[in-house]
Image: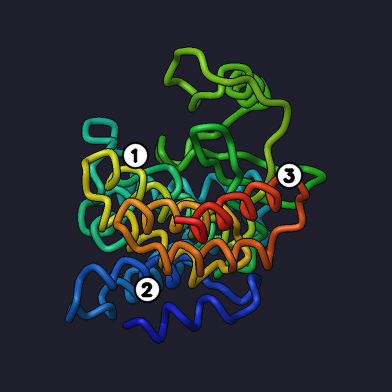
Amino acid sequence: MDEDDLMHLGLVDDDEIILDEAALVLALLDHPGMDGEPYLDLFEAIAEALDEASATASAADPDAEEQAELLAQVIGGAFDFIGDRETYDDPANADVVRVVDRRRGLPVSLSILYVAAARRMGWIANALDVPGHVLVLIGDETVPVMIDPFRGGERVSQEQLLALLKTGLPAGEGGQGTPVRHVAAMPNRAVLVRLLLNQATRAERAGDGRRALTLFERMTIIAPGYPHAWWEQARLQLVDGDIPGARKSLSAMLEITREPDLRARITEVMGSLSAS
């Protein structure tokens, strides 16, 4: 897997993206020469284990609650995927290759495995954007079931979700955050951007701006319609002294942004760059 696979992700329709395979494409860019087949085989092994577990379940056609239980039983139980509480900020937690190797990860990387596995079974599943966290929503919107892959697929009640929205922090983590009023299922590209953003934030925090820039460049390739990635890419290009590159990034952002205030801000920055 190489840059061509990355370009392909930017061209396909959002609903054609297979989340775990796409996350593997992104991860393998940082592991040149590594064979991705064992990881694809593991994704299939999870689906096979789910199929076997479903076949032995009491219901031939499991409902959302039973599907959630099966996902936790197989992915969190048999395959031992769980959140990394001890070294949460380790970049390996957002690298699907390393997540599979270690069986540990961030909420978003683990959610990718749950959602992709559920969809292989023909079940309805989506990653749910929660402040500071990612949950998985199983089933349709009328009777959904929420689970937390970071906690081994543990069920999340409506009360826990409300508490989470009040604090703006992951369930069970404590503390005070920014209160919000709603959560939303994320499109596939948004999930992948969230995965890369986790890596970019950690890279920049560690003082590796070049690495962060590389990750934002990947975001603009796989999700060219997401303005934030273009803005951050331009910012880091300016830090790197690449004014022409920053102009191109801002121009691309201007093409996809319709918000008047943001367009005015972009235009102002581009004007200052032309004057410099």
Amino acid type of the residue tagged 1 in the rendering: Gly
Quarter of the image with the N terminus is bottom left
What separation in Å lies between label 2 and label 1 (alpha carbons)? 22 Å
- The residue at the far front in this view is 275
Compare residues 142 and 260 and report the one nearer the observer.
260
Which one is closest to the eye, mark 3 or mark 1? 3
Tell me which label, 2 or 1, sits earlier in the chain.
2
Residue at 62%, 26% (x, y): give it. 161
User: Circle 2 is placed at which residue position?
Assistant: 25
Tell me which label, 3 or 2, sits earlier in the chain.
2
User: Circle 1 is placed at which residue position?
Assistant: 83
Q: Is residue 48 visible?
A: no
Residue at 28%, 80% (x, y): give it. 37
Amino acid type of the residue tagged 3 in the rendering: Asp
What separation in Å lies between label 3 and label 1 (alpha carbons)? 39 Å
Compare residues 248 and 218 and report the one nearer the observer.
248
Give the quarter of the image for residue 6.
bottom left
Give the quarter of the image for residue 206.
top left
Q: Find out whether the residues at labels 3 and 2 contact each other: C-beta distance under 8 Å.
A: no
Compare residues 115 and 11 and report the one nearer the observer.
11
Q: Position of residue 94 (x, y in %)?
A: 33, 52
- Asked if residue 181 is positioned above or below residue 223 in the image, the reply reads above
Give the quarter of the image for residue 214.
bottom left
Q: Position of residue 232 (x, y in %)?
A: 46, 52
Is residue 196 toward the left or the right of residue 268 in the image?
Answer: left
Amino acid type of the residue tagged 2 in the rendering: Val
